[in-house]
Amino acid sequence: MNDDDIRVRVIKTLCEIVPELEPRNLKPAVSLRDQLDIDSMDFLNFLIALHQEFGVDVPESDAGKLGSVDACVDYLAQALRPLAQT
Amino acid sequence: MLEAETSATTTAVEAIAGYPVGHAVVPNLRDYSAFRSGFSWDAARGDLEGLPGGGLNIAHEAVDRHAAGKRGEHTALRWLGKNGTIQDFSYAKLSALSNRFANVLQHLGVAAGERVYILAGRIPELYIAALGAWKNRSVVCTLFSAFGPEPIRARMALGDARVLITTPALYQRKIVPVLDQLPGLRHVLLAGRSDTDGDIPGALDFAQLLREAGEHFGIAPTDPEDPALLHFTSGTTGTPKGAVHVHQAVVTHHATGKLVLDLHADDIFWCTADPGWVTGTSYGIIAPLTNGVTSIVDEADFDAERWYQILEQHRVSVWYTAPTAIRMLMKMGLAPLAGRKLPALRYLASVGEPLNPEAVRWGVKAFGLPFHDNWWQTETGGIMIANFPALDVRPGSMGKPVPGIDAAIVRHNADGSVIQLDEPGVEGELALRPGWPSMFRGYLNEEERYRKCFAGGWYLTGDLARRDADGYYWFVGRKDDVIKTSGHLIGPFEVESVLLEHPAVAEAGVIGKPDPVALEVVKAFVALKTGYAPGDALKKDIMAHARKRLGAVVAPKEIDFQQSLPKTRSGKIMRRLLKARELGLPEGDVSTLESM
């Protein structure tokens, strides 16, 4: 899976939690909490949904590393890499 | 609740020492019973200074009296920006800045008693504006910035907002869509405006006005009974209720800050609540300042790593937070705490919803200190029942009444009479004897609704509780259908009304569904109009509509479709039955049901 595939699936996952989101307005480098109306429960649900979508462990203590779309893509790309090699 | 019953009915009561033995800082309240019997609100008033020209004003007690004295250069607020900025405001600086803002309001012709609304995240301008507005004797109403346009519109219209302080982003997103429905709004002041915001017609620049205003301001004589605060809360039916508080509420804020939160002058205090809710005003603005401590204000949202870092780096000594946050920290385990040194931390307190016994014990495991749960409401203005340093903490209990507060468990009969239930362990409605300084003085423009809160010489809280043989109170539940989620009170009617605006929705019933972290989450049951078929896409569309109108904290997290909703003969949707079904409980008396 390349970064673009990951990005598409991250945004799709986010839309499940934040259905009012218009993907074209999403700024990939800007913090999700700064540009979207989401509360802490939405954010936790987003982490759970990422785990389900990608099959990657996303502990809540890593929440700070998943603040923006770009950050999510980096985090997931890294987490998926060793899996791809085995 | 099992824990509670064990404690109330058996002799094996679990108790945790309320204060670290031998700590160098001696608690302000050392003997609960003696202090309680010797306490009077009149004497507590003597702890405050009063205005030089007579009367009592919150802002004078919070900043001016410290600014003029030895503590003028002591840090009053330490603001932690999202991006890592730290800004300290001394009492003298906060006094001067709030003077400037009071002058701005004078210059704009804002009169005493007119409502000044603040819709912002936790930014310094919020604190300056609130203090300045009190100096001008205007009434401050803070709105939670995560509300959507509809809850904001409703609250601004009900309170006839005259002035609004907000940010360019919030203004564009949440005010512009409803601006034409706010005819009484005369001035909008934008804080944190930058060149990239472009021209926003009709709005003033907060920073510029502040710069141009004078630094000296004399507070006019303020009657202790002059209105100072308007806080909206939710009922089961109808519009949000605007609870009015007066300037002398500061007597309760100050006393409970000292006796319950155990604030000492050298404390670094952190109240994590947002000033959009009553805790963030009473204990995020007023009580720490009147007690002369350094108060931490963190702009960022909850983040475990960041929170632990704040506790450590800023040497927080007293920490007042909420059950949902504590439970989120618990879920992450103790690993994020490893290597952190928190020697300054002395006292932990929690409010917002009942704190489960496990969370109290977790405090001991994680910090060597129990969380002290306490209980109060928007209407009470300040803490009413609490676990104290001088008393053992009973995990799961809200504690004992604050000195100066008489509490009881009562039964409110259909004929209006009230019977006090004095026997230990009996469930009933929690009631308080009216008369403490921070008691609400009315629901704005709703005399009848206010009157209904009182009977037989008691203020009836709407919360069900019981008292054990030793005088500790235990929360049982709500008497009405109001939803408690993440420490916020949500009125189901407000949510249902917005759901009904969706073209596909024929009926809507909203309940609080139990949740291990947030206590409850908002769940909606929806019946569709003819011609609409339930499906995932429609569900998302309704969800998006609700979130856009209400904001993420108020909108439902779950929506279920139903053929029709259970109603009484008079057509009222039976939320209790929806909830019973959701929980798989017996449905009770259904004799008044029209549809099943």
Image (tube, coloured by chain):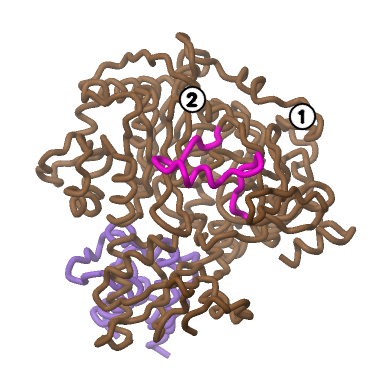
Left/right of residue B279 with respect to residue B317 in the rendered view:
left
Mark 1 = which residue?
B35
Distance between the Cα atoms at labels 1 and 2? 27 Å
Percent position (x, y) of residue B434? 62, 36
Q: Which mark is residue B225?
A: 2
Chain to which mark 1 belongs: B
Residue lying at the far top in this picture: please name it: B53
Residue range (magenta)? B438-463
In percent of the image, x 27 and y 72: which residue is there?
Answer: B502
**Camera-side residue: B284 or B222?**
B222
In percent of the image, x 54 and y 32: which residue is there?
Answer: B287
Pointer 1 and pointer 2: residues touching (CB < 8 Å)? no
Quarter where residue B536 is shown: bottom left
Q: Which mark is residue B5?
A: none
In percent of the image, x 56 and y 40: which residue is there?
Answer: B380
Percent position (x, y) of residue B63? 46, 22
Quarter where residue B105 is shown: top left
Circles 1 and 2 on the same subunit: yes
Do we see residue B437 in this rendering? yes
Chain coloured brown in the rendered structure? B
- Does the segment drawn in magenta span residue B405? no
Left/right of residue B204 with respect to residue B123 in the rendered view:
left
In percent of the image, x 79 and y 40: which residue is there?
Answer: B21
Q: Amino acid under label 1? A: Phe
Q: Earlier in the sequence, mark 1 or mark 2?
A: 1
